[in-house]
Amino acid sequence: MTRELACDISTCVHRDELAVENLAPWDGAACPGKALRRLADGALRSAILLLERGWTAPSARADGALVQVFVLAGRLRVDQTVLGENGFAVLPGDRPLELEALADSEIIVIVDSADVEGPSPEPVILADCLGIAPFVPVIAGKRLEGFERRVLWQDARSGADTRLLKVPAGFGGVGGANWHPVEEEIFCIAGDIQPDDTRPMRAGSFLWNPAYSIHGFDERTRGGCVLLEWHDGLWDLVRAPEADRRHGG
């Protein structure tokens, strides 16, 4: 571990609380959207884009960084493939593909770092990521029966990944407070969940767990949920030290 642990600094917001602004995850392709997270230098990391039918753009970036796309609603054409709800794509900025909103659409975009060493990966285009076979995850040695995890993509260069996770009703946490060595972002697509009593999440809520931050003091859901999760490096779950396992540590 190269950094000190911080406690209880996760940020949770709901999309209704965010202002609409002009965003440009691709060069010269501004459109209305709501920023979910910006980096320390102000660069966009993740956002919800609000696309009107007929919007078009090439997925080009001068820095070559790739942008991930997840369709919440509507229809988005990526090259020759139409992405509907739950469609997913990984678009390297140095090999732009044509994008077109075939209907009013809402999409999540995730802008990955341009500083990852190695050649840019090939594009990934999935009309519906639910076609990926799910598996039951094992965390802290416990098989989470009732869960379904789909790994949508993993960057072979950095270990960064994006996942779709279905959490069953009545889930009540695994091992208490924990931390990760990478940045973790979570968007609630459906249902309800909370990492603790101060951060209730529902459909449209966004949670950022900074790297080395202790969180998950009272994780639970009543009715179950579907979450989109993404990380900027190789994810791991580490149980918090005993002294820091209570809320507010």
Image: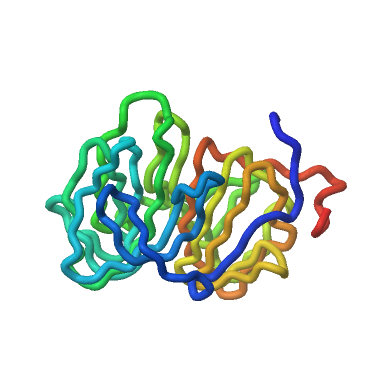
Compared across the picture, whether 19 is left or right of 236 comes to left
Q: Position of residue 245 (x, y in %)?
A: 81, 52
Quarter holding the N terminus?
top right
Please tell me whether residue 72 is drawn above or below residue 7 in the rendered image: below
- Quadrant in the rendering for residue 103: bottom left
Residue at 71%, 69% in the rendered image = 198
- Looking at the picture, the colour scheme in use is rainbow
Q: Position of residue 144 (x, y in %)?
A: 58, 54
Compared across the picture, whether 185 is left or right of 154 comes to right
Q: Seen from this angle, which residue lies furthest right?
A: 243
Please tell me whether residue 85 is drawn above or below residue 63 in the rendered image: below
Compared across the picture, whether 105 is left or right of 153 comes to left
Q: Position of residue 194 (x, y in %)?
A: 64, 66
Q: Position of residue 88 (x, y in %)?
A: 31, 54
- Quadrant in the rendering for residue 164: bottom left
Residue at 30%, 33% in the rendered image = 121
Q: Seen from this angle, which residue lies furthest left?
A: 80
- Please tell me which residue lies in front, 175 or 231: 231
Residue at 38%, 59% in the rendered image = 108
Please tell me whether residue 92 is drawn above or below residue 22 in the rendered image: above
- Please tell me which residue lies in front, 145 or 194: 194
Residue at 44%, 51% in the rendered image = 44
Q: Seen from this angle, which residue lies furthest top?
A: 118
Numbered-mark total: 0
